[in-house]
Amino acid sequence: MARRPLPGILNGSRPSLGSSLSPSLARGRDFARTAADGAADVLHPLLVILRGLRRQTGWLHAWWAHTPKDRRGPALLLVAAIGLVVVMFPYGPYLALTALMGSAAWMGRDRSTPAPAGPSDAESARLKSLYDALVPYLSDPGDPSPLYAYEGDWTEAFGAYEFEDGRLVRLHLRYPAYFTDGEAESRMRVEQVLHAKTGRGREYRFDWDEEENLLGLTALPALPTGIAAQRFVTAPGETVLGFTDPDAVQRTVPVADGEELRDAPPVVWRTGPRSAEPHLLALGRPGTGTTTLLRSLALQALAHGDVVVIDGGGTGEYACLSGRPGVLAVESGLAGTLATLEWAAHETERRLIAVNRARQAGRPAPEDTRRPLWVLADRPTALTQLAHAEGRQDPQELLDVPLRHGRAAGVTVAVADSLDSAEALAGVVVAHTRARVVLGAVSGEETRLVLGAPQCATPAAVVPPGRGYVRLGAGPVLRLQVPATPDPYDEETPEAQRRAVLSLLPMAEAPEAEKLHMHKADLELEH
């Protein structure tokens, strides 16, 4: 018996869709697409009107939902009266319908802004110049397909960019994987080129992504300098060193910036037994604001504790603190400094013994050991040189006990000195001050020596007093602007800042200098 061939659907010989059915399906799809495009063009005005009517309906629904119930009746009565007038007016319904369709067409229009076509000719020239400047640093002769090459295409290297008033404010670029991004010198060379070509006079932050070989450049706005000394909203044991960028910290505090009240991102330094960085070291050249920082710390510390001030420079800029409640001493001479620091060391030991005995007895710590004690030393290296000349003990050696055991005893030490005298600082001071501040126009190498990490941004061309960088322990490096806390007895101090500082001082019999300044201010206000 002869065998019949199996049907095509069983033996796998089904006709191919691409051979017999594909031409008809392709023609059908093209016809449907053409018809849909034509219908969309013809019905586009109707679609716009329908979209506008839908938006008008949504607006009416939202208005009706927010209208109080006692006003809905009069509103409906007013609408009915207007409708009656329109109906009685010649051609009123036609005109009303035309106005409705016109408003619907206006509300239903496409409001999406067209995407920018690309950079302008001037912006393209700036990006091309920046790309050419990076070629010697991000290219290699042995690379068969270099990302950076002379006469290369900058669009392949620059992923995103943003201009503002003709100046580049943001840039994301890719760099080859063989670039030594783990070396500080290589990074510094690239950052210097970007800083010079992008435009000096501004501060730039560089974000290196070594895993993805990406570099981000952002132009940072200048930190505000109008925030003066005031009561900051902080918890006990928290001190505001200054203010930084909004995206650098996760907290804001209300401040008075001139006549404006706003929220500002602070750099909060936590002290006390639970602090990981209980002591601070601030360095800067003369006029950069290290004394202002210590004066700001003193005003904040007097709200909850006692203060001892060592004025090694002998300039008298802490005279406003003399005789105030909570200010135990303000010393500038060598003999008084040695006696005061020796007392601070014995006080630290006394507190440690009292706290230890209370814990062994199962009692809380005594009240006199829980009140914080602040030791503020401004330019102690000047007194060190004087002590060596007279053959007396180095005052920095007396800071050994407060620095080593101050965390458990509630004693905080803050030292400020000149950056040029940093080598004269005692080893115990350098070792136990893990909260670091550097102020003024400093180089990257100086910042690395003080903070232990590179700068988070390039320095600006003009650095106001109190501007610098801060690092708390092993945390990130942040930009810092110290609150304006000038000497209220200085004749050049603005009157608003003088009154702000004097208002924060504890109430006491005002010294003659303060009375004189207040009397002059009152006379000026009367005139």
Image (cartoon, rainbow, N blue to C red):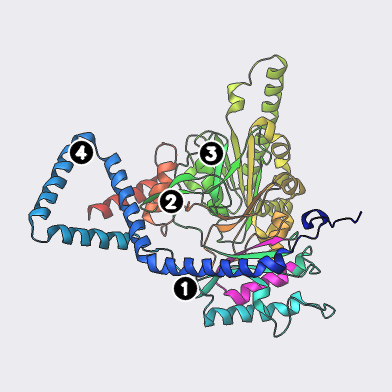
Q: Are marks 1 and 2 in contact (CB under 8 Å)?
A: no
Mark-to-mark CA distance, 4 and 3: 60 Å
Report the magenta residues as a range: 187-209
Q: Are marks 4 and 3 in contact (CB under 8 Å)?
A: no
Q: Position of residue 338 (x, y in %)?
A: 66, 42
Quadrant of res 5? bottom right
Three-letter amino acid code of the residue under disc 3: Ala
Q: Which mark is residue 165?
A: 1
Three-letter amino acid code of the residue under disc 2: Pro
Mark-to-mark CA distance, 4 and 2: 62 Å
Q: Residue furthest bottom?
A: 151
Location of the N terminus by quadrant is bottom right
Location of the C terminus by quadrant is bottom left
Q: Position of residue 507 (x, y in %)?
A: 41, 36
Residue occupying the point 71% across, 41% down: 398
Q: Which mark is residue 301?
A: 3
**Local crowd at mark 3 within 10 Å, few (<14), some, or many (≥20)?**
many
Residue occupying the point 19% across, 34% down: 70
Q: Which residue is mark 4?
A: 72
Looking at the image, tell me whether mark 4 or mark 3 is earlier in sequence order: 4
Q: Are marks 3 and 1 in contact (CB under 8 Å)?
A: no
- In the image, residue 193 lies in the stretch drawn in magenta: yes
**Local crowd at mark 1 within 10 Å, few (<14), some, or many (≥20)?**
few
Quadrant of res 214? bottom right
Note whether 184 is above or below 246 in the view shown: below
Q: Which residue is mark 2?
A: 488
Mark 4 falls on what kind of element? helix
